[in-house]
Amino acid sequence: MTPTQALSSPVRMGLVGVGWMGHLHTRALRRLRDHYPDLPEPQFVIAADSLAGQEAEARSRLGYEQFSTDWREVVSHPDVTAISVTAPNQMHAEVCIAAARAGKHIWGEKPLGRDAHETAAIAAAARKHDVRTIVGFNYRHVPLVQHARSLIEAGELGRLTRVRGTFLADYAADAAGAFSWRFERAKAGSGVLGDLMCHVVDLLEHLAGPVHSLVAQDSITHTHRPLPTAGAGTGASHFAAGGGDLVPVENEDHVNCLARFDNGATGSLEVGRALVGPHVSMGFEIHGTAGALAWNFERMNELRFYTRHPSGGDGFSTVFAAAAHGDFSRFQPGTGIPMGYDDLKVIEASRLVGSIVDGHPYGPTFDDAERATAVVAGMEASMRSGAWEHVL
């Protein structure tokens, strides 16, 4: 996707949520001029956050012309073309649906909704009002993931037989980590299902096709957490140590799932946020009758590819990200020079702006988020029933 036509007016951005992800969205949009000079440069009109103290960050550091403590001013602003929604999960549905009704294009973070019902309502509003959307399933954009998809589509693996996806993390491994909205069902919805499993589902279906049926189980590693001390942060990477009373964790820390795919392959999906050892071990293994692939985000720029040779010498080889893979050449000049996480968000930003330019929806869209949430809902149903469930 390389849109080249110019807009009659710039893409004018609003932001709801001036936290870490709001900063990342803005930086990614600003970097488009460096990596996608064929796209128009966004302008940064207005940012909103419930904390008035974020105004200085929004104006001086991020470069937004205006600030408000009311997100509705972003949605109703006549000069705003598109909105980044990086607020806490409980706000996503209200903000995104209002933005769609106002005709604003939307860059939404996952989980798009706290459950399948909210996500479906958001996606339906975007379709009804014909706005372009993108959702933060950024691992799709890894150049070697795109290469893996092309190898599978070209039949290099033969018939797919086994698919495994994982997202294993340690950000909540410390039992003394403070209780935050992430552990509260009313605010976050599910735990690792919405935070991590949606990534795994989207990535595996992007590569191997739809999940047909599944059975799943969940667990809570640390059943109680201390309330935070005054002024402590609760970011995803490093939870502050709590010092208050212990309160119960309301959503899951770990999920295991067995799955059958429409193409006949079987597989597993596993996620955890409270594991000692892995940091961001997000990846896949895909086996077929003629070859296999393996990739992990912690070694994002390397893909393991197993091929059979008639003369012998079967085995895995390492493919390094290169100009022939996805959008790699927009970021690095040669093989072996690594890309990073923030670069994936720049690619994501290009998909949003590109879709606004030419009117074509580039995935992953809100429809893709709705599909991933349907698979997650199947897991939740299986956890209640203890049985295999078909994905609706």
Image (cartoon, rainbow, N blue to C red):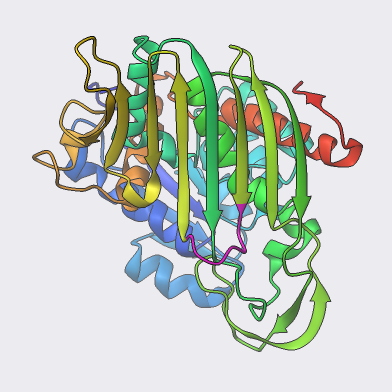
Image position, residue 59 (x, y; %): 38, 67
Give the left or right position of residue 139, taking residue 339 as reference: right
Q: Is residue 20 above or below residue 257?
A: below
Image position, residue 95 (x, y; %): 65, 47
| Quadrant, the C terminus | top right
Closer to the camera in the image, 106 or 187: 187
Give yes or no for residue 190 being in the magenta stretch. no
Please name the residue shown 25% across and 23% down the image: 2
Judged from this view, the residue extending furthest toward the front is: 312
Closer to the camera in the image, 257 or 72: 257
Give yes or no for residue 277 being in the magenta stretch. yes
Give the left or right position of residue 345, taking residue 216 as reference: left
Rendering quarter of residue 71: bottom right
Please name the residue shown 60% across and 19% down the image: 210
Rendering quarter of residue 315: top left
Please name the residue shown 64% across and 26% down the image: 371
Judged from this view, the residue extending furthest toward the right is: 385
Count all numbered tags in the image, as a single digit: 0
Image position, residue 266 (x, y; %): 62, 23
Q: Is residue 353 above or below residue 188?
A: above
Give the left or right position of residue 153, taking residue 255 as reference: left
Decide whether the magenta segment is chiefly helix, strand or loop: loop
| Quadrant, the N terminus | top left
Closer to the camera in the image, 9 or 35: 35
Rendering quarter of residue 130: top right
Q: Which residues are magenta?
A: 272-278
Please name the residue shown 50% across and 44% down the image: 83
Closer to the camera in the image, 314 or 189: 314
Asked whether residue 104 appears in the rendered view, the answer is no
Image position, residue 227 (x, y; %): 73, 82
